C-alpha cells in the first residue's frame, strides 16, 4: 500500500508554480541570511530548515549569507556561532557569503542612482526627516535637500565615503515618492555614516548600506531565485522590487521575495534585542545558557538536532504569526531521547536506606539493561550494597493506597535488584526522616528466575549504592518566564515575568558508570527525566543539566 504523499506548504507551492511557469530547476537557488548581531534562536530554526530543506528537495544550492552591514552591533563571535549552529542542525551551505563582499558594487550602484537623479544626500536631523515623512494617513512632504543637483550629491556622497563628515550628519536617500501609501517608499535611507571598524573590512569604509538596499541587491548578485523572509518584511517587498528595478538586467535571474509567518515560542522571547538584554544584565549566564531559546542554549541543555528539526516540521510553515506552546518542543525532545538514550540511575534528593539483613561489607554487581528501546544497547553492571540512597519523596511513614512507593510495612522492588520491606525509620529533632531501615527478600533478585523474583509488587524505585555513588552537580532548568507571552503586555516589561525558579543547583548522586561521562552525552535518569553532561564538567566535578522531565509538569500547574 503506497503512502499518501505529503501536501506542499504554500512556500513549496510557490516554487512549484514558478517551475511550471518558466523557471528551471537549474535556476533555483536559496539563501539563509542571518545578521551576525547575536546567536540564532529557535525562531531561526524554521527559516534554516525551510531554506536548506528546499535546497535538499530540489537539489539546489543554498548560500549562507551574513547581513553584516552594521559594525556597531556585529562581531566575529556571532559569525562563528551561527556557522556552528547551522552545521549542528545538519545542513551544509553551498557558499559562504557576506553582504560586505558587495560593498563596492553597492556603492557603485548608489552612484548610478545619484547620476539618474534617483538618490540624494540629506543632511537634516533625524527629527526633521521624521516630521516630513507624514503618517500612515497623511502623505509626507519633500525636504529642502530633495532637489539638490546631481553634481552636489555626488560630491557630498564622496565626502561621506571618505570620512569627512561626522556620524549622523548626512545620509543617502532614495528619491521615490514622499506621498506613497507605503511609508517605506517615502525616500528611504540607503547609506548612513559609521566610524567603526568592521569585522571583515576593518576601517576601509565610513559609510554602510541599509538592510533594504543591501538585501535585494545581494540576492541579485548571488542570483538567488527565491528570497524568503518573515512577515514583518511584507511591506518591504515593494521597496525590494524598486531597488531591483534600478539595476536589473533582463538576461539575468530576478529574485522574488515572499514572506512566511514568524513562529514565536511560549514562555520565552525570541527578539535578539531582548535576548541581548538578558545576557548584558546577567539574568542568564550567556547566549548559550540552557534557559535561552538560542540553538546553542538548547544544544547545551541537551536538545538534539533531530528533535528541533522534527519540531519545525510539526509546526510547519504558515501565513499568520502564531504562538507555539513550548510543551510541543519538549514533547519532541522526549520522543527522540526516549529512543536514543541509555537509562541510568541517579538520586537528586537523597534519603539513606539501610538493608539490615544484607551482609555488611558485601558488594554485589547487578545486571542492568541500557535501553528497552534498543536491542543493541546491551547491559551494564551496577553495584549494590547494604546502604543505598533513594529519593526522599519515595518514602512516607504512612500513606493511602494510591501511594505505590515505600511506606512502613510495605514492599517495593529496587530497580534491577531485590524486593525490600520498610521496617522502621530514624528522624532528626525536627521530625524529618533521615534514615529508613529495611529488610530484603534474599531470593527476589530481578532476573534470577526464582518464584520469589516473580512476585508482583506495585512500586519500583531507582537507587544508588552509597559506597559507589558519584557526587554530581545537578542543574535543574525550568522555563525562563512564568507568562506564556511575556513581551506582549503593554503595561508591563517582559522582565517582570522572569521565573525566579528557572534554575536551581543541587548535589545529587549517580551510579559509577557515569563517572567518566563526557560533555554533550545524554542520559535518561530513570523515573526523573533526561539529562545532559554540561561543558563545565571537569575530572573533579561532574555537571548535569536537566533537559526535560519525563512528563510535562507545567500542564498540571496551568490546569490549576
Image (spheres, rainbow, N blue to C red):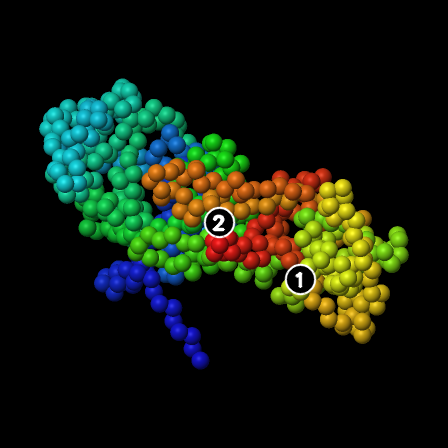
Question: Within 10 Å of the Cα at label 2, are there few (<14), some (14-19), or many (20+) other Cα atoms?
Answer: few
Question: Within 10 Å of the Cα at label 1, are there few (<14), some (14-19), or many (20+) other Cα atoms?
Answer: few
The residue positioned 68% from the left and 48% from the top of the image is 349
Is residue 483 shown to the viewer in this render? yes
The residue positioned 58% from the left and 61% from the top of the image is 338
Q: Which mark is residue 130?
A: none
Image quadrant holding the N terminus, namely bottom left
Query: Foreground: 435 or 418?
Result: 435
Q: Is residue 169 above or below residue 401?
A: above
Image location of residue 468, percent across then percent down: 78, 49
Q: Which mark is residue 400?
A: 1
Image location of residue 385, percent across then percent down: 82, 55
415 vs 101, left or right, is: right
Disc 2: which residue: 87
The local secondary structure at tag 1 comes to loop
310 vs 452, left or right, is: left
Mark 2 / mark 1, whichever is N-terminal: 2
Total labels drawn: 2
The local secondary structure at tag 2 comes to helix
Q: Nearer the viewer, mark 2 or mark 1?
A: 1
The residue positioned 63% from the left and 55% from the top of the image is 528
Is residue 82 shown to the viewer in this render? no
Image location of residue 437, percent across then percent down: 81, 54
The residue positioned 73% from the left and 59% from the top of the image is 407
Residue furthest bottom in the image: 1
Do callouts 2 and 1 mark residues in contact (Cβ within 8 Å)?
no
Q: Is residue 49 above or below residue 442?
A: above
Amino acid at each position: 500500500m503506497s503512502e499518501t504523499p505529503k501536501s506542499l506548504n504554500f512556500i513549496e507551492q510557490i516554487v512549484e508554480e514558478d517551475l511550471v511557469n518558466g523557471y528551471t530547476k537549474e535556476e533555483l537557488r536559496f539563501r539563509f541570511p542571518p545578521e551576525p548581531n547575536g546567536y540564532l534562536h529557535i525562531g531561526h530554526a524554521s527559516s534554516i530548515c525551510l531554506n536548506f530543506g528546499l535546497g535538499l528537495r530540489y537539489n539546489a544550492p543554498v548560500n549562507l549569507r551574513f547581513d553584516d552591514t552594521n559594525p556597531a552591533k556585529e562581531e566575529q563571535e556571532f559569525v562563528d556561532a551561527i556557522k556552528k549552529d547551522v552545521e549542528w542542525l545538519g545542513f551544509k551551505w553551498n557558499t559562504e557569503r557576506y553582504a560586505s563582499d558587495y560593498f563596492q558594487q553597492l556603492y557603485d550602484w548608489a552612484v548610478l542612482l545619484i547620476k539618474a537623479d534617483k538618490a540624494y544626500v540629506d543632511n537634516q536631523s533625524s527629527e526633521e526627516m521624521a516630521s516630513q515623512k507624514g503618517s500612515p494617513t497623511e502623505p509626507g512632504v519633500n525636504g529642502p535637500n530633495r532637489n539638490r543637483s546631481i553634481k552636489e550629491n555626488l560630491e557630498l556622497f564622496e565626502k561621506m565615503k571618505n570620512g569627512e563628515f561626522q556620524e549622523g550628519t548626512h545620509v543617502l536617500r532614495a528619491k521615490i515618492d514622499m506621498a506613497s501609501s507605503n511609508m517605506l517608499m517615502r525616500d528611504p535611507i540607503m547609506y548612513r555614516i559609521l566610524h567603526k571598524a568592521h569585522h571583515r573590512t576593518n576601517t576601509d569604509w565610513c559609510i554602510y548600506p541599509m538592510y533594504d538596499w543591501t538585501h535585494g541587491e545581494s540576492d541579485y548578485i548571488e542570483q538567488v531565485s527565491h528570497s524568503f523572509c518573515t512577515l514583518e518584511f511584507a511591506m518591504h517587498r515593494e521597496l525590494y522590487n524598486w531597488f531591483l528595478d534600478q539595476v536589473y538586467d533582463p538576461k539575468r535571474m530576478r529574485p522574488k521575495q515572499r514572506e512566511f509567518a514568524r513562529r514565536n515560542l511560549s514562555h520565552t522571547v525570541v527578539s535578539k534585542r531582548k535576548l541581548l538584554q538578558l545576557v548584558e544584565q546577567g539574568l542568564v549566564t550567556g547566549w548559550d545558557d540552557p534557559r535561552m531559546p538560542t540553538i546553542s542554549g538548547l544544544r547545551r541543555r541537551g536538545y538534539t538536532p533531530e528533535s528541533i528539526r522534527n519540531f519545525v516540521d510539526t509546526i510547519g510553515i504558515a501565513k499568520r504569526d502564531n504562538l507555539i506552546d513550548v510543551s510541543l518542543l519538549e514533547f519532541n525532545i522526549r520522543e527522540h531521547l526516549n529512543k536514543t538514550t541509555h537509562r541510568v540511575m541517579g538520586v537528586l534528593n537523597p534519603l539513606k536506606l539501610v538493608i539490615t539483613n544484607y551482609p555488611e561489607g558485601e558488594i554485589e554487581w547487578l545486571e542492568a539493561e541500557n535501553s528497552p528501546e534498543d536491542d543493541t544497547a546491551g547491559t551494564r553492571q551496577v553495584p549494590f550494597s547494604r546502604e543505598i540512597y533513594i529519593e526522599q519523596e519515595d518514602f512516607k511513614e504512612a500513606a493511602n493506597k494510591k501511594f505505590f512507593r515505600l511506606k512502613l510495612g510495605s514492599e517495593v522492588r529496587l530497580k534491577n535488584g531485590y524486593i525490600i520491606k520498610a521496617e522502621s525509620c530514624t528522624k532528626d529533632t525536627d521530625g524529618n526522616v533521615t534514615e529508613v531501615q529495611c529488610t530484603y527478600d534474599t531470593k527476589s533478585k530481578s532476573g534470577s528466575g526464582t518464584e520469589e523474583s516473580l512476585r508482583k509488587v506495585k512500586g519500583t524505585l531507582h537507587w544508588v549504592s552509597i559506597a559507589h555513588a558519584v557526587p554530581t552537580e545537578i542543574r535543574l532548568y525550568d522555563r525562563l518566564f512564568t507568562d506564556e507571552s511575556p513581551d506582549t503586555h503593554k503595561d508591563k516589561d517582559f522582565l517582570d515575568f522572569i521565573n525566579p525558579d528557572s534554575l536551581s543547583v543541587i548535589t545529587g548522586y549517580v551510579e559509577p558508570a557515569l563517572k567518566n561521562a563526557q560533555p554533550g552525552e545524554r542520559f535518561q535518569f530513570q523515573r526523573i527525566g533526561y539529562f545532559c553532561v554540561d561543558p563545565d564538567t571537569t575530572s573533579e566535578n561532574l555537571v548535569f543539566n536537566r533537559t526535560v522531565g519525563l512528563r510535562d509538569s507545567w500542564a498540571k500547574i496551568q490546569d490549576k
